[in-house]
Image (cartoon, grey):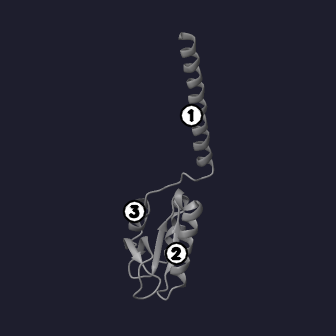
Amino acid sequence: STAQNVSLLFLFLVLFILFTGLLFYKFIGFCRAGRLENVPPVHFLRLFEQHGIEVEKQVPVAPDEGGQPISVADFVVKGTKRAIYVDGAAFHTGKRMRRDKAIREKLRAGSMGWRVVEVTAKDLKTPHAVIAGTGT
């Protein structure tokens, strides 16, 4: 009947508004927590270029000489063993964070002597610190 249809439509509308509000609340919460701070690595590439720092992009890295690569660094400063990782929002969560930390510790501890530099979007606010962190 028409009354039932109107009631169902009203119920659907209320649920839709509640769901949309919940999604918006979650989104604002992520923003306030600083989790939506993804930054494309190209911003760091431009920063390096502006300061005359030559880097290789997307470099497979292994902890030991002749070993299998265990990761791909976003950048490696040419002529050095400095691996630079640009960490976005996904880095700050659960299993992925633990995995990435373990990989980076293996690189640091390996015989290749990697120096691992980790940067985030917040680091773009202090470019001099990023440049200093590259060791150049």
The disc labelled 2 sits on which kind of residue? Ile
Dot 2 or dot 1: first in sequence order is: 1
Residue 71's spot in the image, x, y percent?
44, 73
- Marks 3/2: CA–CA distance: 26 Å
54 displayed left or right of 125: left
Dot 3 or dot 2: first in sequence order is: 3
User: 59 or 55, which lies in front?
Assistant: 59
- Marks 2/1: CA–CA distance: 38 Å
Report the number of discs: 3
Residue 6's spot in the image, x, y percent?
56, 15
Q: Is residue 112 above or below residue 61?
A: below
Q: Is residue 8 above or below residue 76?
A: above
Residue for badge 2:
103
- Label 3 packing within 10 angstroms: few (<14), some (14-19), many (20+): few
Q: Is residue 45 above or below residue 107?
A: above
Residue at the spot x=63%, y=51% of the render? Answer: 33
The disc labelled 1 sits on which kind of residue? Thr
Residue 131's spot in the image, x, y percent?
49, 70
Q: Element type at marker 1?
A: helix
Residue 101's spot in the image, x, y percent?
56, 71
Of discs 3 and 2, which sits in the foreground? 2
Q: Element type at marker 3?
A: helix
Residue at the spot x=56%, y=29% of the render? Answer: 16
Q: Which mark is residue 20?
A: 1
Residue at the spot x=50%, y=55% of the render? Answer: 38
Residue for badge 3:
46
Q: Element type at marker 2?
A: helix
Residue at the spot x=41%, y=75% of the render? Answer: 76
